[in-house]
Image (cartoon, rainbow, N blue to C red):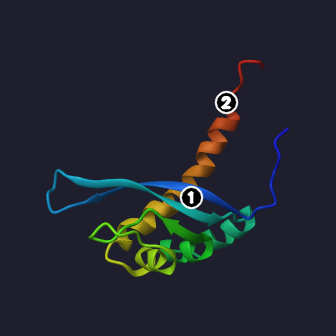
Amino acid sequence: MLRLSKSDTVAMQVRLSIPTDNPTVFNEGTIDCQVKILSKQRLKDLQERETGDAEYLKEILQSVTGLGDADGNPLVGEEALAQVYEGTWSTFLQPAIVQSYFAQFVEARVKNSKPSRGR
C-alpha cells in the first residue's frame, strides 16, 4: 500500500552546472531544497497568470542547503534563500530549482505509466 503522508513539503535535490571564467569548465554540484507540494489547481492558477521563476519560488521554496560562499563557507537559512532570490547567481539558481520541481511530476508520471513485469 502506498501511504500518502500529510506533509505539504518534500525534499528535492537539484543538480547545477554553473559557468566559470573558463568557457570549457563548469562549477558543478547539487543543492537540497525543501519545497511545498502545490495542488493541481494552484499550479494551473499560477500558469494562467504567466508566473515567472521568482514568483514560483516564493510559492514553493521553503529552504535551501548546499550553497557556499566564495571561501567555501556554507550559506544557511535566510542567507541561502537570499542568494537564490537576489544573489549574483540567482539567474542560474532560480530556473534550475523550478525546472527540477516540475521534472519530478514528469518523472513520476513516466514511472507510474510503465507497465510492471507482473501485468
Q: Which residue is mark 1?
A: 101
Residue toward you, 97 or 112: 97
Q: In the figure, is residue 21 to the left or right of 108?
A: left
Is label 1 in a helix, a strand or a loop? helix
Q: Is any part of residue 112 visible from this angle?
A: yes
Q: What residue sits 42% from the left and 72% below the top?
A: 75
Instruction: Return the x and y of residue 105 as percentages of the image width and height.
Output: 63, 50
Q: Which residue is mark 2?
A: 114
Q: Name the quadrant of the C terminus.
A: top right
Indicate the quadrant where residue 20 lies: bottom left
Question: From the viewer's perspective, is residue 55 above or below residue 37?
Answer: below
Residue at the extreme left: 22
Instruction: Return the x and y of residue 14 as percentages of the image width and height.
Output: 47, 55
The amino acid on which the numbered mark 1 sits, given as a three-letter code, is Tyr
Q: What residue sits 52% from the left and 54% below the top?
A: 13
The amino acid on which the numbered mark 2 sits, given as a three-letter code, is Lys
Q: Is any part of residue 50 visible from this angle?
A: no
Q: Which mark is residue 60?
A: none
Q: Distance of mark 1 from mark 2, alpha carbons?
A: 21 Å
Q: In the figure, is residue 1 to the left or right of 110?
A: right
Other-residue count near label 1 (Cα within 10 Å), few / some / many at <14 / 14–19 / ≥20: many
Indicate the quadrant where residue 17 lies: bottom left
Q: What residue sits 81% from the left and 60% below the top?
A: 6
Q: In the figure, is residue 38 to the left or right of 66?
A: right
Other-residue count near label 2 (Cα within 10 Å), few / some / many at <14 / 14–19 / ≥20: few
